[in-house]
Image (cartoon, helix red, strand yellow):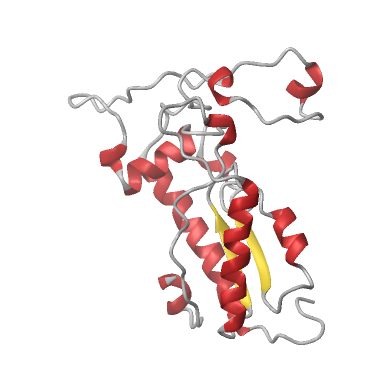
């Protein structure tokens, strides 16, 4: 928000929704789930509130892989005055730079997410007090018995307690705070630039074209 403000955007950041869809991680202690239909209804109600207050542009910044908001955008299209955009920062927003910054591809609590944690909330990273080494394994995951699923052209909702050893997917041991800061700067630059463009865009009959 601050970066967009500094570039001249008129923008308000709503509070984050602190829960997401965790149906496939329910086997882990205190995994808290909000079903997709419930989460979608929360956002629909918030969109209605924004429309009532004359706010007609919205960027949803999603930070959780279990949340799939694209069907919601399709459902809302044409039924609200609010023009809704979606950014999954861990996917498309950073897809072209992750391989340049990180050595190991990851999915959950791997090198990328651990680097961000080391940069911005290191007290939450479980490390050896003397050496700083992570108390973590290599984040290996299991393959299913179906080659089509393993090759990616058939998909499932993965039961995380069977897929992983401790919910981590991806090797975190090359993570550094510097890598986290590098990625965050790219995300801030890209997202703030988009917010500026969105703020300045006129809502005419051909929007967003």
Closest to the observer, 64 or 122: 64
Please report the residue visible at 77 percent of the width from the left and 79 percent of the height from the top.
207
Answer yes or no: is residue 197 visible.
Answer: no
Above or below residue 107? Residue 150 is: above
Q: Residue furthest left?
A: 130
Q: Position of residue 55 (x, y in %)?
A: 58, 81
Say how many tags the image has. 0
**Could you say where residue 127 lies in the image, as x and y percent from the top left?**
27, 28
Residue sitting nearer the eye, 173 or 204: 204
132, 59: nearer the viewer: 59
Left or right relative to 147: residue 47 = left
Identify the residue shown where x is 76% and y is 23%: 149
Residue 98 drawn at (x, y percent): 57, 43
The vertical placement of 184 against 12, above or below, is above
Q: Is residue 36 above or below residue 44?
A: above
Q: Is residue 108 left or right of residue 180?
A: right
Location of the C terminus by quadrant is: bottom right
Q: Residue at x 51, y 64 (%)?
A: 189
Quadrant for the N terminus, please.
bottom left
Residue 4, percent from left and from top: 48, 74
At horizontal 53% and vertical 27% (from top left) the residue drawn is 169
Seen in the picture, residue 94 relative to 194 is either above or below; the reply is: above
Can residue 81 be seen here? The reply is yes
Check the image and name the residue furthest to the top.
145
- Frontmost residue, 206 versus 98: 206
Q: Quadrant of residue 143?
A: top right
| Residue 153 image-quadrant placement | top right
């Amino acid at each position: 928000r601050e970066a967009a403000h500094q570039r001249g955007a008129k923008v308000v950041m709503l509070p984050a929704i602190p829960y997401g869809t965790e149906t496939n991680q329910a086997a882990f202690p205190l995994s808290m789930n909000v079903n997709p239909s419930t989460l979608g209804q929360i956002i629909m109600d918030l969109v209605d509130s924004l429309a009532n207050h004359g706010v007609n542009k919205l960027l949803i910044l999603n930070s959780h892989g279990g949340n799939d908001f694209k069907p919601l955008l399709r459902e809302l299209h044409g039924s609200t005055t609010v023009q809704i955009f979606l950014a999954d920062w861990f996917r498309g927003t950073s897809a072209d730079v992750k391989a340049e910054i990180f050595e190991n591809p990851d999915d959950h609590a791997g090198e990328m997410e651990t680097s961000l944690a080391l940069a911005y909330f290191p007290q939450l990273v479980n490390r050896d007090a003397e050496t700083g080494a992570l108390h973590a394994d290599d984040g290996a995951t299991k393959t299913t018995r179906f080659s089509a699923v393993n090759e990616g052209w058939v998909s499932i909702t993965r039961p995380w307690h069977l897929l992983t050893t401790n919910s981590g997917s991806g090797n975190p041991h090359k993570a550094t705070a510097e890598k986290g800061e590098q990625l965050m700067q790219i995300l801030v630059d890209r997202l703030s630039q988009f917010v500026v463009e969105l703020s300045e865009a006129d809502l005419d009959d051909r929007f967003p074209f």
